Image: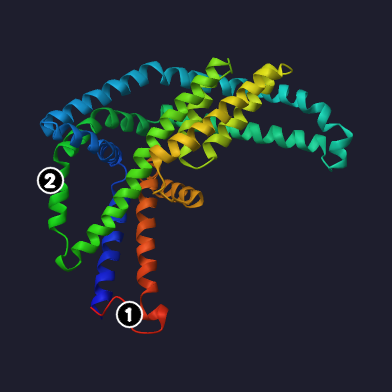
Amino acid sequence: MTRHTRIMLFWLGALAAAVVVLFVFRAILLPFIAGAALAYALDPVATWLEKRGINRGVAAFAIVVLIAIVFIAVFVLVVPVVLNQLVDFLQQLPSYIGRLQTLLGPWLDSDWARFLGINADSLRASLNGFFANGAAIVQTLLSSLLTGGRTVIDMASLLFVTPFVVFYLLRDWHRMIAWTDGLLPRDHADEIRQLASSMDQKVAAFVRGQMLSGTVLGIFYAAGLVAIGLNYGLLVGLAAGILSFIPYFGFATGFVASIIIALVQFWPDWIWLAATVAVFMAGQVLEGYILQPYVIGTRVGLHPVWLLFALFAFGLLFGFLGLLVAIPAAAAFGVLAHFAVQRYQASPFYRGGPSQTGNE
């Protein structure tokens, strides 16, 4: 067995062990993963304060207190309103469907629809079934989330365990990085550091940038839709911002939902329908010309299909915990895959000659 083969087997074994640990302990990892994610996102803030003469522990404590205040304010002021809007929307969904069918009825029965081969009765039945099934799934999911004992435990752990995890990780972040660096195999330390730096840049650009971008977009969409008086504007706007980490998905979801609600609520007053469109067009300008170049940057390079696959795969394996680690893991795997392709293209197996990186 060659040296390269032994090294590859070692790292594959380490990766397999990490996946097994995540899977075995997935029931208790949620507050720790959430705390690690917050500490990673907030480490630049703690470092900035430390460079200005504030003790690292004091800076970490102040950050945790501030985050707790913001979280409590959002939980008290925003979450109840959003949940009430969601419940009310699900209750009103049948009447919205009926109103929408009434508005679309003349077009469905028109000569143009028949010319295009659209069967009005079949389309109405399909729409009824789609909305009814979707509403039933959402209601079942919400019911299980709100009444399940596991959910209560998860929420309690997030509220009481995560702040301690964030504090201790923020306080000791640099020491842990130095300790980990000391464990690297000396022959490959520089190469591993380079890979870790690439992963850090990509994950940081996406996680920190997208968190800020999604927050700004969610507030912008929600404020705009509430300002024009759209029903469930806060719910739709915040959802569009949260889902914006998948390119165009958050925009498309919020835009379609808003147009449907605006048609039912405002038609035939087309001015408010145009105002709804204007809110989302302005949001796209904000994202494309300000948030994307100046907040997220161009270093991310995560394909939307790869993001969706990672979300589904990690969600299937680890549940809600998987959704938290899916995007950082996708970014890290992207860096590793790029490195593996580079090594493969420099190998005799690809080039058909001696290795260009030298024999080890």
Please report whichever mark, 1 or 2, sits nearer to the chain's N-terminal start.
2
> In what quadrant of the picture does the N terminus appear?
bottom left
Q: Mark 1 points at which residue?
A: 355
Residue behind mark 2: 175
Q: What element carries label 1?
A: loop
Mark 2: which amino acid? Arg
Instruction: Residue at 23% x, 32% y: name it.
Output: 161
As drawn, 285 above or below 266: below
In which quadrant of the rendered image does the C terminus lie? bottom left
Counting from the top left corner in percent of width and height, residue 176 is at 15, 47
Q: Where is residue 114 in the image (x, y as percent from the top left)?
A: 87, 39
Residue 155 horizontal side relative to residue 281, left or right: left
> Can you say whether 167 is above or below 326 in the image?
above
Q: Residue 253, position in %: x, y?
A: 57, 34
Q: Element type at marker 2?
A: helix
Where on the picture, by quarter, is residue 75?
top left
